[in-house]
Image (spheres, coloured by chain):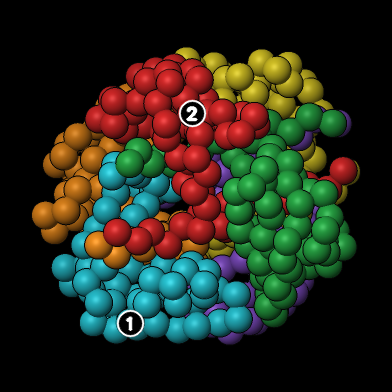
Chain colours: A yellow, B purple, C orange, D cyan, E red, F green
Amino acid sequence: MKLSARNTLKGKVTEVKLGQIVGEVVLDIGGQKITSVITRDAIEEMGVKVGDEISAVIKSTEIMLLKS
Amino acid sequence: MKLSARNTLKGKVTEVKLGQIVGEVVLDIGGQKITSVITRDAIEEMGVKVGDEISAVIKSTEIMLLKS
Amino acid sequence: MKLSARNTLKGKVTEVKLGQIVGEVVLDIGGQKITSVITRDAIEEMGVKVGDEISAVIKSTEIMLLKS
Amino acid sequence: MKLSARNTLKGKVTEVKLGQIVGEVVLDIGGQKITSVITRDAIEEMGVKVGDEISAVIKSTEIMLLKS
Amino acid sequence: MKLSARNTLKGKVTEVKLGQIVGEVVLDIGGQKITSVITRDAIEEMGVKVGDEISAVIKSTEIMLLKS
Amino acid sequence: MKLSARNTLKGKVTEVKLGQIVGEVVLDIGGQKITSVITRDAIEEMGVKVGDEISAVIKSTEIMLLKS
């Protein structure tokens, strides 16, 4: 199975919060934190919980750059 | 200066490709690769080049999860 | 600090609503209204409140055009 | 006809650039500049040209906030 | 009225769920299911309800491909 | 393998166009047309060509609704 999205970052779930429609999942990606907001249905169907090895997937056109 | 986007991943530029309207920038984020597609104008104004320390910024609602 | 996003529109906050995971912030941009949905965490950490001078930031690939 | 996107900003086209697949349209929105990247096909079918009165349409979940 | 978004899929509403800020609308598109998350305000202003003939609109840069 | 994106629409490729950085893939989804803009790299690595059975994947927060 091949997905066109160029970005798959492996991480570990550190936090899961559920709202009515969407929920928030925080991942640790090699020491850096990523927050994902997806539907509550997706979190429940995937059974996402703290400690899970999971990947963040991001389409290239959604990534901005910041130079300090 | 505070930006609402929850995700800022520090990385180093490994590749820059320019098209007519958009361009592609590849970052190394602690050993994992990220590809960003932004406007050519942005790449040129920011002066992005290989070796730069730069961050990827992503809005939380743009991050999907993948469980293998 | 330079951000690749091409669009920064200065405005004033006219409304803030908080849900469990996300919240809604309405800005007045020179007489036109903009509604942003971001995480509740971002609204709280930035301390967004009615009357604040704040900017909307939008990646160019997220802007559609409509001709009437 | 009703569209769910909460944000429609009226403007005037100041620049149009065409690439092979996508193109860039710059609008003036009450003195502030907005850059949109859409498909070349869309620009051609809509017949977008400098001077046109046109609106930018943006889904609320695509708008970030920046506080300086 | 012409919108630059290249993708308009006609469907019928099979489910509507409201949260505080956003809501979820499920459409049947010729036998395939589509879930849209938009603001609660948009759902209420448009008066979306089960059985409505409605279209899903998607910007081309938001569509990924998956090959199995 | 489970992906959080709620929307996977099965289709058949009817057109592929390549630019320098991005390309355009048109799918037929049960008689309705979908246009996807992804990186040229993704199109080449996945080997997308006319006639392929392929799916469009879309995050729920990217889907707007239109009522006529």
Residue A6 as seen in the image, left or right of residue E44: right
Residue for badge 2: E12
Q: Residue B9, image x and y in percent?
A: 63, 51
Residue A34 as seen in the image, left or right of residue C30: right
Looking at the rendered structure, the secondary structure element under dot 1 is loop
- Up-down relation of residue B65 to residue D55 (above or below): above
Q: Residues within 10 Å of mark 1 (few under 14, many from 20)?
A: some
Quarter holding the C terminus of chain D is bottom left
**In the image shown, does B15 or D34 lie closer to the viewer?**
D34
Residue at (52%, 29%) from the top-left corner? E27
Please name which of the two marks, 2 or 1, marks the residue nearer to the observer. 2
Amino acid carrying mark 1 in the image: Lys
Residue D49 as seen in the image, left or right of residue F48: left
Q: Residue A42, image x and y in percent?
A: 65, 23
Amino acid carrying mark 2 in the image: Lys
Residue at (47%, 69%) from the top-left corner? D42
- Up-down relation of residue C8 to residue D17 (above or below): above
Which of the 4 image quarters holds residue F13? bottom right
Which of the 4 image quarters holds residue E28? top right
Looking at the rendered structure, the secondary structure element under dot 2 is strand
- Up-down relation of residue C57 to residue B43 (above or below): above
Residue for badge 1: D49
